[in-house]
Amino acid sequence: MVPSDSAQAPPRHPLVLLARQAVETYVRFGRIIDVPQPLPPELSQPGAVFVCLKIGGVLRGCVGTIEPRSLSIAHETIANAIAAAVNDPRFFPVSVAELPSLTYTIDLLHPPEPVNSIEELDPVRFGVIVSSGARRGLLLPALEGIADAAMQVLLAAQKAGIRPGEPVTLQRFAVERLT
């Protein structure tokens, strides 16, 4: 008997598959993969990308860029996936034994827009960037445990080392989340 389409696992987005291949190749062999060719036009453009790794729903690494640093979204995904696996300072590097348990989320960031007040934020719909001088902290949208915009701003400021009461500027951004 052949299972129906509704019983099959949904196909993974090509960037999620690329992130997985990048992490597995780097962790197993210490090698950075090449960007597959030809790239579809939507992956050939520069873009800001966050790659988050989880095991059993628990964060295992998350690294990204607010602004593009690479030639393409594909390059950015490879670099940030490897960094999430081995360079997130909150965690030890991912081990070979953990590879089968990892799940991947890719967030493609839309350009940030300034906001004038916390009332313009919505932690479910928008990520936030909190800045004070050269210090910047970012939180992605729709994170578990973020109850409101005030908490989102507070945590993003803490990530940047911005103390309560310091003057800040706020920006918000939307993401396209891929799994």
Image: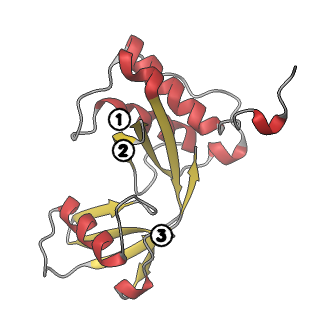
First reached walking from the N terminus: tag 2 or tag 1: 2
Q: Which residue is mark 3?
A: 126
Q: Residue at x 57, y 28 (%)?
A: 35
Q: Residue at x 45, y 63 (%)?
A: 141
| Distance Cα–Cα, label 3 vs label 1 | 24 Å
Disc 2 + disc 1, Cβ < 8 Å: yes
Q: Nearer the viewer, mark 3 or mark 1?
A: 3
Q: Which residue is mark 1?
A: 83
| Residue found at the far front of this picture | 1
Q: Which residue is mark 2?
A: 63
Can residue 133 be seen here?
A: yes
**Element marked by disc 1:** helix
Within 10 Å of the Cα at label 1, are there few (<14), some (14-19), or many (20+) other Cα atoms?
A: some
First reached walking from the N terminus: tag 3 or tag 2: 2
The amino acid type found where label 2 is placed reads Val
Within 10 Å of the Cα at label 3, are there few (<14), some (14-19), or many (20+) other Cα atoms?
A: many
| Residue found at the far right of this picture | 1
Q: Position of residue 88 (x, y in %)?
A: 27, 39
Can residue 32 be seen here?
A: no
**Left or right: where 10 falls relative to 74:** right
Within 10 Å of the Cα at label 2, are there few (<14), some (14-19), or many (20+) other Cα atoms?
A: many
Q: Position of residue 7 (x, y in %)?
A: 76, 35
Q: Is residue 83 above or below residue 99?
A: below
The amino acid type found where label 1 is placed reads Ala
The amino acid type found where label 3 is placed reads Phe
Q: Residue at x 85, y 33 (%)?
A: 4
Q: Is residue 74 above or below residue 122?
A: above
| Residue found at the far top of this picture | 29
Disc 3 + disc 1, Cβ < 8 Å: no
**Element marked by disc 3:** loop
Disc 3 + disc 2, Cβ < 8 Å: no
